[in-house]
Amino acid sequence: MSSKEKPTLGGTRIKTRKRNIAAPLDPAAFSDAVVQIYLDNAGDLELIAKCIESSDLNFSRYGDTFFEVVFRGTRTQPGTIKLDEGERHPYSIFDCEPSREVILPSVIYIQKLLRRRPFLIKSLENVMQKFLQSLELFEQDERKKLAIFTALAFSQKLSGLPPETVFQPLLKDNLIEKGLVLSFITDFFKEYLVDNSLDDLIAILKRAKIEDSLMDFFPSAKRTPEALSEHFTKEGLLLLVEYNEKKLFEVKLKEMKTAITNQISEAADVAEVIETVKQHVKDAKFPDIEVVRILWDVLMDAVQWSGKNQQQNANSALRQVKTWAALLNAFCTTGKLELELVYKVQVQCYEDAKLMKLFPEIIRSLYDQDVLAEDTILHWFRKGTNPKGRQTFVKSLEPFVKWLEEAEEEE
């Protein structure tokens, strides 16, 4: 062999790489095949599931088309919810009665398919999202069936279906203004709460990031707490009414707390702070007891604590009480409210180590500033019902109570 000749292997064949030839999409043939399975088994979902399981249909490619057939009996035109030409079966979710008993088997059937083919969850999301964005194109009973299916899907914990996929498409202004979203969401709430607790429902709404947005489902002209309460009460959803009232209460309470905190940090005039509190109480109708609790929390939160120096902490707390005594006095207008303030001080001193030894001094200061009456302190000492640290605090308050009793006897 010359030095210029290249060595070769006799009898070898050089393989060439085959090009990937993409098969053309044919959703029509896939749809017709699924429809035929439904027709052959007369809508029996058990038999249909077995046939689908043993079939060689390309679900990974036509997952969306499959769920269109499940929901509507046939495929829809690309980019729309309009039915396309082709075979159709009469056993779809939209063709059945709008009741949980009839729709539940379809949910269980889909659940079984998803366990076998978990990748189909994305196709289910896509189809549901498309339908929910187009609620105005469905008839009222079709929207109700979709709401029932959605509620049952979450109730049955349909594999991997994310709440945000379901609810976020509903927040479209045109759907909301027509009242379609409110109708859908009401049907959903009613159906879901049949088998689940309010806490379960709130967990779903939190995952969808709409737990604070119930009012956003109402048309703008009806977006008021009164309209929400009236609507859900009429629909038998009192649990939602109470939940929304609680959320509104918490929001308004936080707003009042923030306003007072800002004024205290700016060393505003006591009279100005009193007016601020009164305005918030008037607007939100806060219970008097809640106001007293909030005022004490805000005042103590504003104290500049000094770590482990008990004397400095005592001086700071007592200075705060003296400075803002008029604020407390303006809202501790009855013996019951005064007693509530004592309980509030008791619990805070029990739960906060740096205040544990300050209880008698704080009570004495509140007495000196005319916030607490003698009768209130004696009632708490003799008959107080809150057990948190009570024995310790009663003992520490004994000298002051003895002084009060002696003063009472002298009078």
Image (spheres, rainbow, N blue to C red):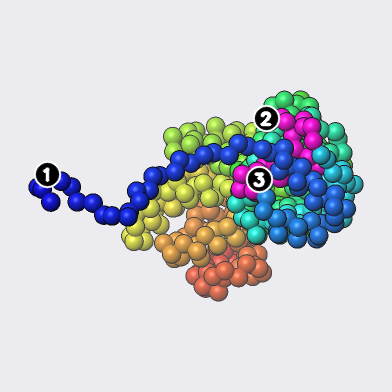
What residue lies at 58% left-to-right and 39% top-to-bottom? Answer: 23
Q: Badge 1 is on which residue?
A: 4
Distance from label 2 to label 3 (Cα)? 15 Å
Residue at disc 1, secondary structure: loop
Q: Amino acid at mark 3?
A: Gly
Q: Quadrant of residue 387?
A: bottom right
- Camera-near label (3 vs 1) is 1
* Magenta segment: 58-86
Q: Dots 3 and 1: beta carbons under 8 Å?
A: no
The type of residue carrying mark 1 is: Lys
The quarter of the picture where the C terminus appears is bottom right
Q: Residue at x 75, y 38 (%)?
A: 75
Query: Mark 2, residues whose alpha carbon is within 10 Å: few (<14), some, or many (≥20)?
Result: few
Which residue corresponds to mark 2?
Answer: 79
Q: Secondary structure at mark 3?
A: helix
Q: Decide: marks 1, 2 in contact (CB < 8 A)?
A: no
Q: Toward the viewer: 42 or 325?
A: 42
Pointer 3 residue: 63
Label 2 amino acid? Gly
Residue 69 among magenta residues: yes
Quarter of image, res 215: top right
Q: Residues within 10 Å of mark 3 (few under 14, many from 20)?
A: many
Residue 69, quarter of the rendered image: top right
